[in-house]
Image: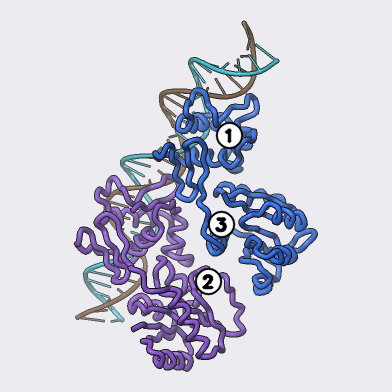
Chain colours: A blue, B purple, C brown, D cyan
Amino acid sequence: MQTILVIDDDENLRETIAILLEREGFDVILAPNGRSGLDLALTAKPSLVICDLRLPDLSGIEVCKRLCLAGSGPPIIVLSAAGDEVDKVLLLEIGADDYVVKPFGSRELLARIRAVLRRVGPEAERVLGFDDVQVNLERRVVTRGGQEVKFTPAEYNLLTFFLHNPDRPLSRDLILNSVWGYESFPNTRTVDAHVVRLRQKLEPDPNCPRHFVTLHKVGYRFLP
Amino acid sequence: MQTILVIDDDENLRETIAILLEREGFDVILAPNGRSGLDLALTAKPSLVICDLRLPDLSGIEVCKRLCLAGSGPPIIVLSAAGDEVDKVLLLEIGADDYVVKPFGSRELLARIRAVLRRVGPEAERVLGFDDVQVNLERRVVTRGGQEVKFTPAEYNLLTFFLHNPDRPLSRDLILNSVWGYESFPNTRTVDAHVVRLRQKLEPDPNCPRHFVTLHKVGYRFLP
DNA sequence: CGGGAATTTACAACTCTTTCACAACTCGGA
DNA sequence: TCCGAGTTGTGAAAGAGTTGTAAATTCCCG
């Protein structure tokens, strides 16, 4: 599982990126400023850092430098505002691996991330699972006891969301926002229906769920 | 005997490089602009391409992209003028193998050429396939059960893109960007239409595709 | 035991894909 | 330069597959 650290003082953007990346199967950790970002980068050992150029305390440049000082730190992608006069060469020289100019499309950011990760090293097999169930995020394939199990997009998205958030109580609203997105507003019963489908396909005994557990009046919880 | 294609609008430089390379025992072909360069690269199958960044029609970047489309294509060394603000990362990302800043010495250029050729190594067996279908990238010929099957350029590009990316979910957008390129904007239905054509030509049963599989709401997947 | 909450099922609406025909376009040759 | 064959992108209609929801039922907790 690959972890990405996002350092940006704009909470909105931070969350947007987080959701985007999580949906792609990355673990995401967030920091609102340079100092905490540096700390996290050194303690959490992320596979990649996305860092805004303009931060309240340390500048993005400063962050890059410090991270590179540490030797073989994680690769860094710098975000810069459209107006900024960015010295690309300088950025790359001090250790940034790539930069993206705001505003950027999600596709662009993802492409750059993958390019950097690919360049840095062979991508770890991105496989999650529990019991005899395996989910290959790269291939978008789910197997159970070696047999492929088919999933519709909504089911698959819900499944990976659970897998990325094990052991946590997840409210229906949170699930809706994370999996369906802010633009669509299905009612919360919808989540139930899809959980049922997951259970039927993946629970050893769908009548007595052990992995996709109901939290009465709260929501659901996924237990590996 | 190895052939090198030189794309540069400066006739003087072109000739200088040609003489230099021929003295070293390479076959050299020349092109004064991006378009004819691309044509030559595709028809003459050089072992290596040297391409100026600044060209009258297509930029060197554009040339790189096109050449790398299907993931095969010859290695590329980019020439950039001293003043150019070169985005090294971008260059390497889109498929250039190395770059040399003008003015350069003949020794340097030769060293880089040899390095790239060495890295690329003995030409890989460039035949891909599945079932009784064989695709010879060298000759640009597709056979099925020994019989040649004709492919139009768009079909062929799509086919090789699939072949180079087996087993992965490929969104329509990704396919469009990779096969058609960032500058052309056909709508995503176009991909469907071409997939249909591939299936009709290559699937044992076009009504029940086993190799070019639809991922509903996601895109397509190629399974060898 | 009562009432709200969760599950289950079935289904209709909907979205996405396939198919097909066609017009625009490209390119080579006369 | 013009023409014709071949190629390619697109729209429209039909066909598949997906998904949100309602309604009936069961479950859970107080």
Q: From this viewpoint, is residue A108 visible?
A: no
Q: Earlier in the sequence, mark 1 or mark 3?
A: 3
Which of discs 3 and 2 lies nearer the camera? The answer is 2
Distance from Cα at disc 1 to Cα at disc 2: 42 Å
The residue nearer to you, when weighing B43 against D19, is B43
**Residue at 41 percent of width and 80 percent of height:** B37
Residue B112 in the image: above or below residue A141:
below
Residue D23 in the image: above or below residue B91:
above
**Residue at 24 percent of width and 56 percent of height:** B132
Amino acid type of disc 3? Leu
Location of residue B152 (image quadrant): bottom left
Residue A41's spot in the image, x, y percent? 69, 56
Residue of label 2: B92
The residue nearer to you, when weighing B102 against A167, is A167
Residue C27's spot in the image, x, y percent? 31, 75
Q: Which mark is residue A126?
A: none
- Write down the chain letter for disc 1: A
Amino acid type of disc 2? Leu
Q: Which mark is residue A110?
A: 3
- Write down the chain letter for disc 2: B
